[in-house]
Image (tube, rainbow, N blue to C red):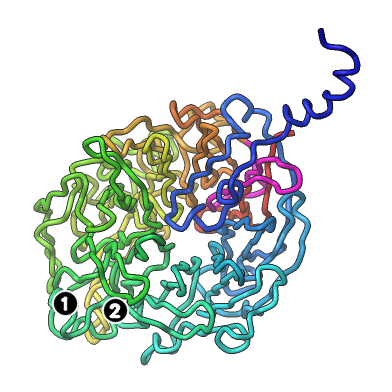
């Protein structure tokens, strides 16, 4: 029989045991890299927020960075694309003007800031930073902050002071040696660098509107000194593998072929995986005949030397600006009952390429299929393109006139007028000619820099996408121009009406779950809505979206991304939308989650800044959600 003395003595201990959270390893409580881990899985093992209680998720705090631009006073506009890190009880956030903020992860209170004095009068394509990188050797702890001027800063993670041993007073100018004769053009960092052992590896954002320009080479610098350790030529030089895929001297000073998105790192194998872009210029390549390695390729490099381990080209001689936009996902899948290390690369075209991580060999068959040939004088057209047999494409890759929108009579009439004399029908990889042509997917995808989330429990990949086509044609340039033809379109080349409603029937945005063991879809759900159409009683259409998902052990996929100022949770097994909240502006970013070090609460964080190409509301707020 339990006595009163028993309860008075033992009850406090029993209560502590009942309510105390389980002790999790640091890597499960934190978010140490842009994609959660260096391999970019965008996965969290936290399950405090789950299917049963997600409906109770409420706003916990908001931090306003105050950094944004609508283009009225500064040269361009902003897009708050950052995904914060949470390491050692501190939340690290980069703003659109490249200020580094350290916040209390439980309250959002600012602890310190580092301001690199980014020149806001610089005419970049838009003000943005997708985040920062964290590195430690167990003693020193550094945050690496890059900016759109090409500068890389090493900042003490505890104090916010620069490391005086790194470069010059804590800064290295990564542009040095990259500009050639094109110092009047742009070279910078929009995505975090990738720590790998004793180096950090950097891609770049470069001016690629002309055929010649700054270099898109990949480089690595020493984490302690900032000294350049190696440089990988993304356009091979004479004597290097792949040089013969560029006819004549077309390789010289070639613009593009850079990695503006995130890189992934396999620390155990000391390999870095690089998603490379298309060459300049985007739609004309008669001056660069050949397959053009390593454009549109996933390239695996040795972190220590920069030597190529393997590569896989997803498009030969790109004429559509379908560059690789997202971080390669380093995943483990099952083949014949065995665990296989793999790389999953999502694309603008709507394909997922699943490759063996050590060799680059496809894990699902990839066929070289004949594709249509064009008739632009002087152009080179690749006779075939690589098409994966599995998984099936997760986005629209073509349409017919019968699929012109009917969401409203006004939209239908406007879109029918637009395509009156245009090419509408046609397969993927159809070349763009002199006549206005509908191109699916458009230049933003498909998938974009938000990438995919991978659930290691089920080997399912979750990817958001949009169906916004392009509407372009080739126009002959005057004699003596740098290239004889340029692409021209209407309304930024987007295939939408004056209200920015896409011109084809919905859905316009989707979230897809793909089983990487079988290559089959688990489900596909509509992502987003257009408020004006919802008010008119039109069923949910989906919405254009930029940003990515995360998946958790709580059975949920969290995503904002859509241009409807909302963040959502989906049941990862069924695809059912189970929670939605409005944001102060659209969250064109990828969320992250962590366990508050003081409260023990699981927080969900999203950068809500609107802007970009799809919104008229601009801001710079970081919004945190938690259970009450």
Which image quarter holds the N terminus? top right
Image position of 191 (left or right of 585): left
The secondary structure that dominates the magenta segment is loop
Nearest to the observer: residue 265 or residue 206: 265
- Would you say residue 304 sits in the magenta stretch? no
Q: Position of residue 397 (x, y in %)?
A: 26, 45
The residue drawn where x is 19% and y is 66% is 317
Q: Kindly state the secondary structure of the residue where label 1 is placed.
A: loop
Q: Kindly state the secondary structure of the residue where label 2 is placed.
A: loop
Residue 101 vertical placement versus 286 (above, below): above
Magenta segment boundaries in residue numbering: 581-604
Observer able to see residue 128: no
In the picture of the structure, the residue carrying the numbered disc 2 is: 233
Q: Position of residue 234 (x, y in %)?
A: 29, 75
Nearest to the observer: residue 469 or residue 545: 545
Observer able to see residue 204: yes
In the picture of the structure, the residue carrying the numbered disc 1 is: 246
Mark 2 touching mark 1, by CB under 8 A? Answer: no
Extreme bottom residue here?
A: 181
């Amino acid at each position: 029989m339990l006595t009163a003395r028993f309860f008075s003595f033992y009850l406090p201990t029993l209560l502590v045991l009942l309510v105390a959270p389980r002790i999790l390893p640091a890597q499960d409580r934190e978010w140490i890299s842009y994609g959660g881990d260096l391999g970019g899985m965008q996965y969290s093992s936290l399950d405090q927020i789950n299917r049963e209680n997600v409906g109770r998720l409420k706003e916990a705090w908001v931090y306003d960075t105050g950094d944004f631009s609508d283009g009225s006073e500064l040269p361009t506009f902003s897009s708050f694309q950052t995904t914060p890190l949470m390491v050692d009880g501190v939340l690290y956030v980069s703003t659109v003007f490249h200020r580094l903020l350290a916040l209390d992860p439980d309250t959002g209170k600012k602890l310190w800031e580092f301001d690199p004095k980014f020149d806001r009068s610089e005419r970049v394509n838009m003000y943005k930073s997708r985040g920062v990188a964290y590195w430690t050797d167990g003693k020193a702890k550094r945050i690496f902050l890059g900016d759109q001027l090409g500068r890389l800063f090493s900042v003490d993670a505890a104090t916010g002071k620069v490391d005086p041993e790194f470069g010059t007073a804590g800064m290295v100018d990564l542009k040095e040696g990259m500009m050639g004769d094109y110092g009047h053009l742009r070279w910078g960092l929009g995505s975090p660098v990738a720590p790998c052992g004793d180096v950090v590896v950097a891609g770049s954002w470069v001016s690629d509107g002309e055929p010649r320009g700054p270099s898109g080479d990949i480089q690595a610098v020493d984490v302690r000194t900032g000294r350049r350790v190696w440089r990988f030529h993304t356009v091979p030089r004479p004597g290097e593998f792949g040089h013969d895929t560029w006819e004549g001297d077309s390789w010289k000073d070639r613009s593009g072929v850079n990695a503006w998105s995130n890189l992934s790192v396999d620390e155990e194998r000391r390999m870095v995986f690089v998603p490379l872009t298309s060459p300049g210029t985007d739609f004309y390549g008669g001056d660069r005949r050949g397959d053009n390695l390593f454009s549109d390729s996933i390239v695996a490099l040795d972190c220590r030397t920069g030597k190529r381990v393997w590569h896989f080209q997803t498009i030969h001689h790109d004429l559509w600006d379908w560059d690789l936009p997202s971080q390669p996902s380093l995943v483990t899948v099952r083949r014949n009952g065995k665990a296989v290390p793999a790389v999953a690369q999502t694309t603008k075209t709507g394909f997922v390429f699943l490759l063996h991580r050590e060799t680059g060999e496809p894990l699902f068959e990839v066929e070289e299929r004949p594709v249509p040939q064009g008739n632009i004088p002087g152009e080179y057209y690749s006779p075939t393109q690589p098409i994966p047999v599995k998984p099936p494409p997760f986005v629209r890759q073509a349409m017919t006139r019968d699929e012109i929108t009917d969401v409203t009579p006004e939209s239908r009439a406007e879109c029918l007028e637009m395509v009156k004399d245009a090419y509408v029908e046609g397969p993927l990889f159809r070349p763009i000619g002199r006549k206005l042509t509908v191109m699916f997917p458009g230049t933003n995808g498909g998938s974009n820099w938000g990438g995919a989330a991978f659930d290691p429990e089920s080997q399912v990949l979750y990817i958001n996408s949009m169906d916004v086509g392009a509407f372009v044609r080739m126009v002959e340039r005057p004699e003596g121009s740098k290239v004889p033809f340029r692409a021209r379109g209407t309304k930024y080349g987007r295939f939408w009406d004056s209200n920015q409603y896409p011109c084809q029937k919905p859905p316009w945005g989707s979230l897809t779950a793909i089983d990487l063991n079988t290559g089959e879809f688990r489900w596909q759900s509509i992502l987003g809505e257009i408020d004006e159409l919802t008010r008119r009683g039109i069923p949910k259409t989906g919405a254009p979206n930029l940003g990515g998902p995360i998946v958790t052990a709580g059975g949920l996929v969290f995503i904002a991304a859509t241009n409807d100022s909302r963040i959502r949770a989906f049941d990862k097994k069924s695809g059912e939308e189970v929670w939605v909240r409005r944001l102060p502006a659209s969250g064109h970013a990828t969320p992250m989650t962590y366990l508050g070090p003081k409260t023990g609460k699981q927080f969900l964080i999203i950068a809500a800044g609107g802007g970009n190409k799809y919104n008229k509301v601009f801001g710079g707020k970081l919004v945190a959600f938690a259970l009450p």
